[in-house]
Amino acid sequence: MFSRLAKTSILVVGLMIVALAPATLSAGATPSPGPSAASARSITLYGSYQNPAGWGWTPSNISNGLTLTVNKDDVITFHLYANDSMDHQLLIDLDNSHSNTTGDAWSPMFRSNTTAKDWQYTASTAGTFAFFCNVHGYAAQHGMLAVQTPSSGGGGTSMDMTTLAIGGIIIVVAIVAVVAAVLMRRKRP
């Protein structure tokens, strides 16, 4: 039938296949995304009351209807410019009343078109909120701030390539040790 060495070799190969199968299957798997951590965001805005009125990323793309999208708990640093050198004040309308009410967040006044007025805001509430110029009103200058709740997948454990490499090395060392032990136990003629 089979010699002892052949049986041991078959056993070792079988153990290798059983040990490496889960690692091989999970190597191509994509882990479920966990909750996203809050991040620091930097947003430059140009405000203008003169034609065109509104907000923009640059002085040349100002309009009403700009939408800013961030994640809940992001810390946003707004770099605020007045494209028309008039006084402006960014107001985030947390109750969507289109007016300045208790609980709304607003920046300091700004009017420079060359030096930004920096204002930090933490997006602590998920939802969609209007923002507008508190000086000129919602009708003249407005946009939307969309604060998204970070995705919360299964967040299960995942194996990366380092874990797989370490596991593979341990398996190879164990196989070599078993084969060496079997060969050393063989009787010599």
Image: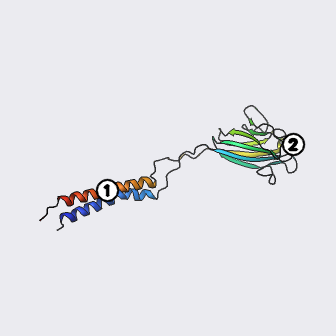
Q: Residue at image x 37%, y 56%?
A: 168
Q: Residue at image x 18%, y 63%?
A: 4
Measured from the top left, where is residue 8 in percent x and y? 23, 61
Measured from the top left, where is residue 132 in percent x and y? 79, 42
* Quarter containing the N terminus: bottom left
Q: Residue at image x 81%, y 37%?
A: 109
The residue that label 2 is drawn on is 86
Q: How many marks?
A: 2
**Which numbered circle lies on residue 160?**
none
Residue 110 picture quarter? top right
The one nearer the camera, 96 or 90, is: 90
Measured from the top left, where is residue 171 in percent x and y? 33, 56
On screen, residue 170 versus residue 4, left or right, reads right
Residue 121 picture quarter? top right
The one nearer the camera, 76 or 184, is: 184
Q: Amino acid at mark 2?
A: Met
Q: Kindly state the secondary structure of the residue where label 2 is placed.
A: loop
Q: Kindly state the secondary structure of the residue where label 1 is placed.
A: helix
* Quarter containing the C terminus: bottom left
**Which numbered circle lies on residue 173?**
1
Q: Residue at image x 85%, y 51%?
A: 52
In this rendering, the label closer to the viewer, 2 or 1? 1
